[in-house]
């Protein structure tokens, strides 16, 4: 008995959310096998019936396709679905006059996906498993950045030892799914709108008092993130020191990310010259 090891690509799901299908086609890819062997350069007569029941009785749309496999045993056809008048629940696949398989419409989306050329998706695409890409992938992630720069510096007074003082940011850029709140001498922070694992990078430049140890970190909802921290003892008063680092943080939508500095074990004054914090979502 012939066995088909591929799923019919039912991208129609993206179009069947409307009451009447627009002028669209779906791409059908097949790899038929006979006794476990692929069938290259072979012609098959396929019939695709879109139905509302799994008994294939109530046919909403029926389409024929003569598919000839290539040298690798892969066949391809475009099926016009522009005359669909309602959303089907099942796709009954016939090959050479025999019913081979009844597909739930969702099965074509959640199983293997074979794309011969380009796949253009105008809506959302949810992938529950792995996505393996051999070529290049052009994607748009969630990200955000805030920054501040002042060559003359802004005074910071570390009046309480070992206490974090947040720094402000006046500018933001490249925001996508991340919100910025801030301004000069104003409480400043980034807020992601989508939960997930984020790569967080920071860089702060400032001066302080010689032989004082300064710690720079990221605060999430006012909590110190010890895996996102940099510390250094200043060699001389007035020297400008840059502290930077990156880390991975699990963030929830609405979390508040701030940058902060403390004089570890002492009190002092310093100047804040430059700062930037940027975050990028890299996983769930």
Image: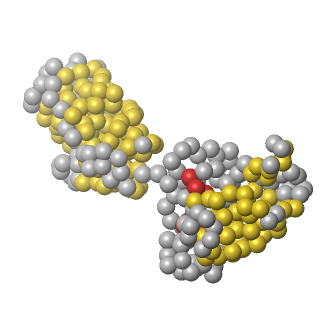
Along the line of sight, the residue nearer the viewer: 280 or 233: 280
**x and y percentages locating residue 88 in the rendered image:** 56, 70
**x and y percentages locating residue 275 in the rendered image:** 31, 42
> For residue 47, what is the image quadrant?
bottom right
**x and y percentages locating residue 273 in the rendered image:** 28, 41
- The quarter of the rendered structure image containing the C terminus is top left
| Residue 276 appears in the figure | no
> For residue 165, what is the image quadrant?
top left
Residue at 76%, 49% (x, y): give it: 3
| Residue 125 appears in the figure | yes
Along the line of sight, the residue nearer the viewer: 39 or 225: 39
Residue at 53%, 73% (x, y): give it: 87
Along the line of sight, the residue nearer the viewer: 238 or 242: 242
In the rendered image, the residue lying farthest to the right is 41
Along the line of sight, the residue nearer the viewer: 95 or 119: 95
Q: Is residue 281 above or below residue 247?
A: below
Q: Is residue 230 above or below residue 137?
A: above
Residue at 63%, 81% (x, y): give it: 83
**x and y percentages locating residue 16 in the rendered image:** 54, 71
Task: Report the side of 21 relative to 182 (left or right).
Answer: right
């Amino acid at each position: 008995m012939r066995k088909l090891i591929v799923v019919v690509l039912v991208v129609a799901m993206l179009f069947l959310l409307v009451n009447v299908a627009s002028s669209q086609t779906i791409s059908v890819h097949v790899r038929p096998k006979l006794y476990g062997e692929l069938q290259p350069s072979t012609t098959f007569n396929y019939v695709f019936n879109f139905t509302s029941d799994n008994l294939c009785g109530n046919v909403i749309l029926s389409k024929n396709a003569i598919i000839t496999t290539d040298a690798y045993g892969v066949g391809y056809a475009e099926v016009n679905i522009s005359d669909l008048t309602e959303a089907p629940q099942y796709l009954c696949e016939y090959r050479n006059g025999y019913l081979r398989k009844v597909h739930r419409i969702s099965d074509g989306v959640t199983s293997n996906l074979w794309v011969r050329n380009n796949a253009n998706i105008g809506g959302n695409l949810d992938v529950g498993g792995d996505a393996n890409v051999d070529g290049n992938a052009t994607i748009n992630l969630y990200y955000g950045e805030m920054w501040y720069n002042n060559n003359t510096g802004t005074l910071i007074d570390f009046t309480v030892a070992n206490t974090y003082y947040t720094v402000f940011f006046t500018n933001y850029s490249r925001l996508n799914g991340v919100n910025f709140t801030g301004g000069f001498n104003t409480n400043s922070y980034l807020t992601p709108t989508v939960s997930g694992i984020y790569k967080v990078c920071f860089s702060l430049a400032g001066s302080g008092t010689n032989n004082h140890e300064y710690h720079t970190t990221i605060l999430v909802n006012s909590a110190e993130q010890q895996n996102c921290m940099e510390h250094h003892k200043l060699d001389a008063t007035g020297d400008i020191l840059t502290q930077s680092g990156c880390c991975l943080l699990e963030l929830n939508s609405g979390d508040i990310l701030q940058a902060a500095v403390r004089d570890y074990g002492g009190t002092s004054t310093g100047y804040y010259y430059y700062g930037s914090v940027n975050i990028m979502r890299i996983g769930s």
